[in-house]
Amino acid sequence: MTRAERIDALKAAAGERILVLDGSWGVMIQRQNLSEPDFRGERFRDHGHPQQGNNDLLILTRPDVVADLHDRYYAAGADISETNTFSSTRIGQADYGMEDAVHDLNFEGARIAREVADRWTEKEPHKPRFVAGSIGPTNRTLSISPDVNDPGFRAVTFDEVHAGYKQQARALHEGGVDLFLVETIFDTLNAKAAIKAILDLEDEGYEPLPLWISGTITDRSGRTLSGQTAEAFWNSIRHAKPFAVGFNCALGADLMRPYVAELARLADTLVAAFPNAGLPNAMGQYDERPHETAHAIEEWAKSGLVNIVGGCCGTTPDHIACVARQVADVPPREIPERPVAMRLSGLEPFEMAS
């Protein structure tokens, strides 16, 4: 299929059933017990910085590992798999001294995922597979000072974050992704830089792609790290007319549910959620078993809250297989029609009827 045909197929599938995203990449890569030479490969053998833990770099040094994980998630029943590019911006790769590899990371990450997805689509044409270009939050925040003694200080500027995201988005697009997934958003201003970067590509003649925006409610306060409630977050990004909006990470399904329900009530687009496998234990490990995660997500589905589901930290192909089975026969959430109104937000939402 052409990319336009794939996008049409994605939208058609979303109208017919609940779509399934893949699960965690970090936990699956950790299970490979890879060493420093695996991360460096021949290309970066003499690089001056340690690379172990730079999971995105495996795209270039162990593409077999990356392709295998895409394959395992598609086999588990995922409709959509993310590129392994969560940290593939110049800002994210600066910690490893890998800024010059950013274009290749994103282009090759998209290309590998595209090849695996196309093989599955050819094998199972009734269930086409799609690729989401993963765009993470970076390790810098535009809204919060990293210096408690200087609240006005920022370690990075909006223009720098925008430029980093634009480089990433361009390479993902050229590599063949079907949609962009701006995910794990803890700072809405960072997300706005990513949204602008993606929309700017259209001005350069790039084909528009569906945009999925996924925030993170960091704790029981019900707010993102930069302070917004779920409704305020939605009001802040709805101008981008996303294909889907939702939440991921930080919480397990039980604690995430009220915020997913809030978006389901508010958003006049698809609602997506991919929770962690519960909360981490004292050793930082995730104990929630596949059927437990799947049972919670099934309740979301039967309550009419979601259109796309998947897993974040701690989830595995076994979790995704259970989730896919549990939501297979549940109809997707119906998108509500909301009255026209002026909706604004800071940390709190504000609405004025027309």
Image (cartoon, rainbow, N blue to C red):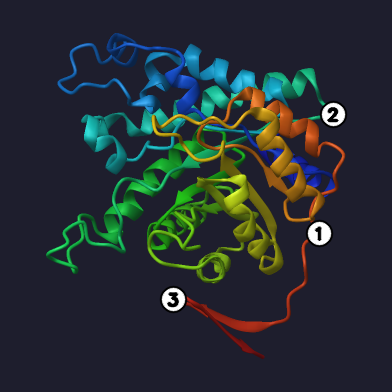
- Residue type indicated by callout 1: Glu
Q: Which of marks 2 and 1 precedes in the sequence?
A: 2
Q: Could you tell me which residue is drawn at 38 percent across and 25 percent down? A: 55
* Mark 2 neighbour density, 10 Å: few (under 14) some (14–19) many (20 or more): few
Mark 1 neighbour class, 10 Å CA radius: few under 14, some 14 to 19, many 20 or more: some
Is label 1 in contact with label 2 (beta carbons under 8 Å)?
no
- Residue hosting label 3: 346
Separation (CA) of disc 2 from disc 3: 44 Å
- Relative to the observer, which residue lies in front, 272 or 206? 272
Residue receiving disc 2: 126
Amino acid on which the number 2 mark rests in the picture: His
View extreme (left): residue: 149
- Report the disc number at residue 140: none
Contact? badges 3 and 1 (CB < 8 Å): no
Identify the element where label 2 is drawn: loop
Above-or-below relation of 341 to 140:
below
Which residue is at 80% across, 46% downward? 12
Quarter of the image for the C terminus: give it: bottom right
At x 18%, y 23%, the residue is: 49
Q: Position of residue 187 (x, y in %)?
A: 39, 59
| Left or right: 287, with 36 as reference point | right
Residue 154 occupies quadrant: bottom left
